[in-house]
Amino acid sequence: MTSPDPVISDSATAADPDGSLAEQLLRLTRRVHRIQKRHIELSGLGVTPAQSRLLRTLAHYDSPPRMADLAARLEVVPRAVTSLVDGLEASGKVRRVPDPTNRRVIRIELTEDGLKALRALHAARRSAAREILAPLTAEQRQVLGGLLDTLVDGDARGCGA
């Protein structure tokens, strides 16, 4: 793991423990992204992390979503989704299909190759998670899971409620 930022002194860290935690979370996030990216590259699927995210998002829909739905879910501009879909369509992992009720609307669905890629991506993510969590005991992992749930859910006590 990289050493703490030398610009931040020990006294500054002691004076701002939340700032120190925020910095640790940012460093961990960057490390997780690096490790996941490496594992995705090692899978040989030829997809980018952004394409991987789009494939995972598609898997959550019961029926093929519109591009606008994907953009909203991914919190990106529609043009970004178009570029991602173009690349995934060229590699045969997704296809554009007409909406059955409105011919002006195009929906995006996973192909068989896309489903296979998704399974391989899940395996790559599990492998990355094993690497990231390797230093922790089972008990520490359980505690971490609880803490992360609290942070992700945004406990109302921390919001002045």
Image: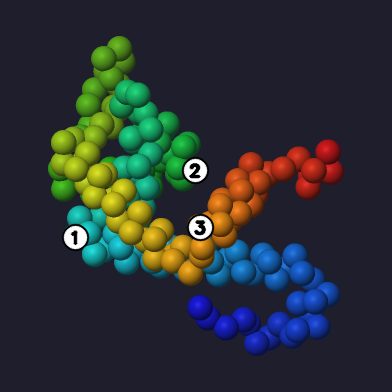
Type of the residue with mark 2: Glu
Q: Is residue 148 visible?
A: no
Task: Please name the residue that numbered disc 3 is placed on.
Answer: 138
Q: In the rendered view, does 28 fall on the left or right side of 11?
A: left
Do the residues bearing badges 3 and 2 touch, measured as CB atoms within 8 Å? no
Indicate the position of residue 34 as horizontal and vertical percent values: 40, 67
Residue at 39% from the left image edge and 61% from the top image edge: 130
- Tell which tag, 1 or 3, sits nearer the viewer: 3
Image vertical order of residue 141 relative to residue 95, above or below: below
Element assignment for label 2: loop
Task: Please name the residue that numbered disc 1 is placed on.
Answer: 44
Type of the residue with mark 3: Ala
Residue at 78% from the left image edge and 47% from the top image edge: 158
Spatial CA distance of label 3 from label 2 is: 34 Å
Q: In the rendered view, does 26 fall on the left or right side of 86?
A: right
Do the residues bearing badges 2 and 1 touch, measured as CB atoms within 8 Å? no
Indicate the position of residue 125 as horizontal and vertical percent values: 35, 54
Element assignment for label 1: loop
Task: Please name the residue that numbered disc 2 is placed on.
Answer: 75
Reading the chain from its start, which is encountered first: label 3 or label 2?
2
Q: Nearer the viewer, residue 100 or 137?
A: 137
Q: Residues within 10 Å of mark 2 (few under 14, many from 20)?
A: few
Reading the chain from its start, which is encountered first: label 1 or label 3?
1
Element assignment for label 3: helix
Image vertical order of residue 59 relative to residue 104, above or below: below
Reading the chain from its start, which is encountered first: label 2 or label 1?
1
- Tell which tag, 3 or 2, sits nearer the viewer: 3
Residue at the farthest top position: 101
Q: In the rendered view, does 95 fall on the left or right side of 61?
A: left
Q: In the rendered view, does 51 fall on the left or right side of 13?
A: left
